Image (spheres, rainbow, N blue to C red):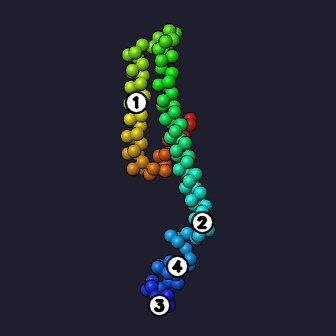
Amino acid sequence: MSGDGDGDGGTGTMGETGGSVGGRRPAQRPLMLRWQVVTVLCCYLGYCAVLLARSALDAVLPAMEEDEAIGLDNTAAGRLLAVGTTGYLLGKTVNGFAADRFGARLVFSLSLLGSAG
């Protein structure tokens, strides 16, 4: 047995071995934190872009109704909004099940590629 007195056979304190914390060397932690922050910011900005695209129709719908060349009445405008909302609802549901089955990282990556194309 090792002589540090905690009974784990290692050389560190409270179960630590070799000076690493959580299996990572201390020098790797700032790099990992940086990538985590970048990932969260990219997710946030991507979600903001999607919400902006979804709300763009609300902003231009009054002008579309006034334009006689388009010929959009209140019923057609309501149907247009309903189709967008229904697609959003179905997409959230299907992607949620797909993320549970295939992994969130894969589904999110494919969704971003699909949105970009």
Q: Position of residue 4 (x, y in %)?
A: 49, 87
Vertical placement of 65 versus 18: above or below? above
Write down the residue under mark 4: 17
Report the Cα–Cα distance between label 1 and label 4: 54 Å
Query: What amino acid is at disc 4?
Result: Thr
Vertical placement of 83 versus 10: above or below? above
Q: Residue at x 50, y 70 (%)?
A: 22
Mark on residue 85? 1
Query: What amino acid is at disc 3?
Result: Met
Write down the residue under mark 3: 1
Write down the residue under mark 2: 28
Task: Tell me, yes or no, if residue 47 can be seen here.
Answer: yes
User: Considering only order in the chain, which callout, 4 or 3, is on the residue closer to the N terminus?
Assistant: 3
Q: Residues within 10 Å of mark 2 (few under 14, many from 20)?
A: few
Spot the residue most to the top.
Answer: 68
User: Considering only order in the chain, which callout, 4 or 2, is on the residue closer to the N terminus?
Assistant: 4
Q: Position of residue 70 (x, y in %)?
A: 50, 12
Tag 2–tag 4 contact (CB < 8 Å): no
Report the Cα–Cα distance between label 3 and label 1: 65 Å
Q: Residue at x 45, y 85 (%)?
A: 6
User: Considering only order in the chain, which callout, 4 or 1, is on the residue closer to the N terminus?
Assistant: 4
Query: What amino acid is at disc 2?
Result: Gln
Which quarter of the rendering shows the C terminus? top right
Element on which disc 3 rests: loop
Q: Residues within 10 Å of mark 4 (few under 14, many from 20)?
A: some
User: Considering only order in the chain, which callout, 1 or 3, is on the residue closer to the N terminus?
Assistant: 3
